[in-house]
Amino acid sequence: MIGIAPSSPRRTELGLIVLAVLVTTGAYVLASLGKTASLPANVGPFLIVIVGLLAVAHIALRRLAPAADGVLLPVAGLLNGIGYVFIARLNKDLAGLQAMWTAVGVAAFIATLAIVRRPRDLERYRYTFALIGVGLLLMPLAPGIGRTVNGARLWVRVGPMTFQPGELAKIVLAIFFASYLVEKRALLSRKNLPEGARSMLARARYFGPILLAWGASLVVLVAEKDLGSSLLFFGLFVTMLWVATGWVLYLAAGAGLFGVGAAMSFAAFAHVKERIDVWIDPWSRQSTQGFQILQALFGMGTGGLAGTGLGLGDPQRIPAAETDLIFAAIGEELGLLGTVAILVAFLTTVGVGLRIAVRARSEFEQLLAVGLTTVIGLQAFLIIGGVTRLLPLTGVTLPFVSYGGSSLVANYILLALLLRISDSSAKATA
């Protein structure tokens, strides 16, 4: 079979990277002109850093994964760049840190490509990944190092460094889920459904994994007071279980369990009840809990179709605009067109990720690609849905866009794994 020449996706990638650099640099200059009516003094160093990091990542792919997809890296670079422009617009101190974390993320991206040469090798360490994943999830609960920020206990502080281990846990658990479901796919599939007098007892094993995942998500919700991560991990497992078995009943069971868990949490936990109440009626709490989401809505409403213009809006009035609500800041200054562009970028990432899954040569690689893509897509859906009041605001970060070192590094590792699977599949069919 004739495969794609290794240089072909890299040529596509290089052209798209040049376009992403032009868009990001133009946005950076416009944001400064709108704010100070002068060109930014550091536009040269900014351009060098943006071009340099993407160039290094591109060269690494040429050497380490030459046949990998040529779209994912430029789209991630564009999202990262637009996010940086708005973080610099909102908080210059955080912009410097975000630039540093971008460099660390690109280094982690290259290291992942260098270390993981064959994705199937990860399958052999399924239970090691399970232990690491659970450990990362529970690490914020450890006395002495766990930290509570904005009511959620998600952070760990070791010496001068503070990070969010749950961001890495989502990748590690996706690897474990993929390996586990490949091993248990036949047992969990519909065609092996038992019949007869013993069927009710025997059927229990089919829903044991989903019940376990549901229980684990409730532990995260109760102990760490984090609705977003709880939804993300449960949604990840249910989606991968459905894809592995093709049995839609798992989706129905997952939705039912989610409904039960939501009702229980609403009745039992004040922080969950507060999130739901604010989602339903922020107007009666406009000066307290509803202030944040209402300012986000006012900002996006002010943006209209084309936005106020970069540097001409007032997104600083939105609390936590550089983290939880950066999508609202983009909506204010770039309008509906800008937010749709961000949505298209995420839809492109999800579409390419699923295409990689379809082309994968092994069941493990297929499920892992689905899991990694689900993490990106579901996380973006949760936070954008929260900002637009389609869902309760959960506080997860918008991948590659929001400020956050842990999130940025984890997403670059996730991207490297997807590209490694893509490269492996392309070489297998060449």
Image: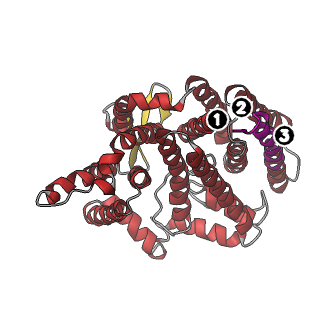
Residue ID for mark 2: 66
Q: Residue 110 vs residue 260: left or right?
A: right
Q: Secondary structure at mark 1?
A: helix
Q: Residues within 10 Å of mark 1 (few under 14, many from 20)?
A: many
Amino acid type, callout 3: Val
Q: Which residue is mark 3?
A: 43
Question: Label 1: which residue?
Answer: 423
Question: Which of the marked residues, 1 or 2, is nearer the chain's N terminus?
Answer: 2
Say which of marks 1 and 3 sits in front: 1
Instruction: State whether the magenta stretch is mostly helix, strand or loop.
Output: helix
SS for callout 2 = loop
Q: Is residue 114 left or right of residue 289?
A: right
Q: Are marks 1 and 2 in contact (CB under 8 Å)?
A: yes
Residue span colored magenta: 1-23
Relative image position of residue 91 (x, y in whole percent): 66, 46
Decide if residue 363 is in sight here: yes
